[in-house]
Image (cartoon, coloured by chain):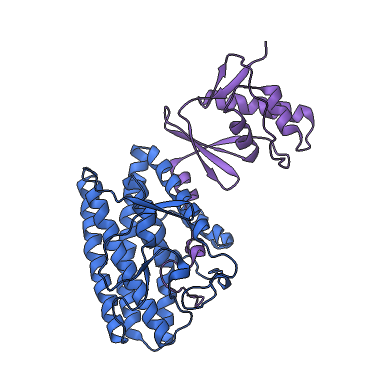
Chain colours: A purple, B blue
Amino acid sequence: MMTHYQRTGGIEGVALEQQEVLFQPKTNKFVLLNPNAKLVFAALSQPRSAAQLCAALAAGGAAATAVDAAVAQLLADLLSRGLVQVVAAAPAAPMAAQPVLPWHAPALRDVTEEEVLAAFQMSAAEISAASCWWFSCSTGCP
Amino acid sequence: MSTAPSTFAIRGIELASDPAREPCFQVVHLHTDLMDLAGMDAPARRQRLHRHMHNEMQNLEIAAQTLADFPDAPWEVRLQIARQCWDESRHAALVHRRLLAHGGRKGEFPVMNYEWGVVCRMDSLAARLALQNRSFEAGEMDLLRHLQREWIAAGDGETAAVYDAILADEVNHVRYANRWLQRECRERPRTAFEVAKAVMFLQRVTAAMAPQPGDKNAAGVDLGGWTHLDVMCNVADRRLAEFSDAEIHEVLRREGLGSLAPKEP
């Protein structure tokens, strides 16, 4: 019987550009998902088989064997961190059309609290995009 | 009973409702309704000082509201927030004095409670400090050095000196927030997640409030013509405020200046 996987309840995520940072409250640990891993994790809001996940990534242009191996590794990494769990096979809804991303292996990386603090910042210029918020900046803008 | 402010929606974003204002102030909610002026002529100088004064008022109010909203926070951080209230009230008075010296008056220009609306929407102390201190005030540190030079070039050394004094205080406000957040993250890692969510909220607000092509403000100034790209990271003061090398590197990277980042030891 085909194994199905689904996100573990209570996992929180926040987008970081094209990536996503997940927080596992049971272990107090963070991981960073690359864009294709983010896509996989989003699909796991419902029970999915590895084959379904591979099919979603195959449009990126990689060889099927490479996709299969990368998805298997990602699922193992997610399982070992308690971010997904094996669930009883269920008639999952068809997967919605996924954005086609250039192929790179979906992967995750453990990140520290310090790395999260560093990653989530805004520069003065970025904040000023909503019009210079403090007062006229050195560009002479209003 | 919660003292947290109520909210209102603008451009699809929920922000904290305005704090009380004296009748002399016209409060608006969009940058298009402000009368911010470009350049450094006499009205623009008064307008800059007026906006700065109002921002200092907001910073006082945000810090005071945070003291009220988080009565169980550790004494050490509450003491720092209380000191920040004193600093911000002094800054508001200092800038008001410069406004009067330039012939301006309180209420001369419309005001917007932007920082208040964003920061007081946050429901954790970590998120408040992440936005008020680590984002807005850290950004202010980046601006103040440039602005000191501008006022000196405009022949107003007294205003430049006021900015120098304010900058010294802002470094301390950012530093205590960094210290507290770093310690909290070690003891309670979820704190970093609260910071991340707060910064993402600020990004959404910024995107929603950004001027649309062709937007002009109430003074007729085109708001779409500015990129703010030369507002650069003030590395020296960010170091004094105890941002890590990794954090400074990230801000420089976001400014397209990653090659200038401090080297790893």
Q: Position of residue B20 (x, y in %)?
A: 26, 62
Rendered-image quadrant of the N terminus of chain A: top right
Residue furthest top as drawn: A1
Whether residue B130 is visible, yes or no, is yes
Q: Position of residue A110 (x, y in %)?
A: 52, 36
Residue at image coords 31%, 72%: B53
Looking at the image, residue B256 sits to the left or right of residue B4; the answer is right
* Residue placed most toward the observer, B54 or B169: B54
Looking at the image, residue B213 sits to the left or right of residue B249; the answer is right
Looking at the image, residue B230 sits to the left or right of residue A106; the answer is left
Whether residue B242 is visible, yes or no, is no
Q: Position of residue B162 (x, y in %)?
A: 30, 77
Residue A70, relative to residue B177: is it above or below?
above
Residue furthest bottom as drawn: B155
Residue B200, relative to residue A77: is it above or below?
below
Residue A100, relative to residue B25: is it above or below?
above
Looking at the image, residue B191 sits to the left or right of residue B60; the answer is right
How many numbered badges does the structure rendering display?
Answer: 0
Residue at image coords 58%, 43%: A19
* Residue placed most toward the observer, B218 or A73: B218
Quadrant in the rendering for residue B118: bottom left
Residue at image coords 29%, 57%: B62
Q: Position of residue B86 (x, y in %)?
A: 21, 64
Quadrant in the rendering for residue B114: bottom left
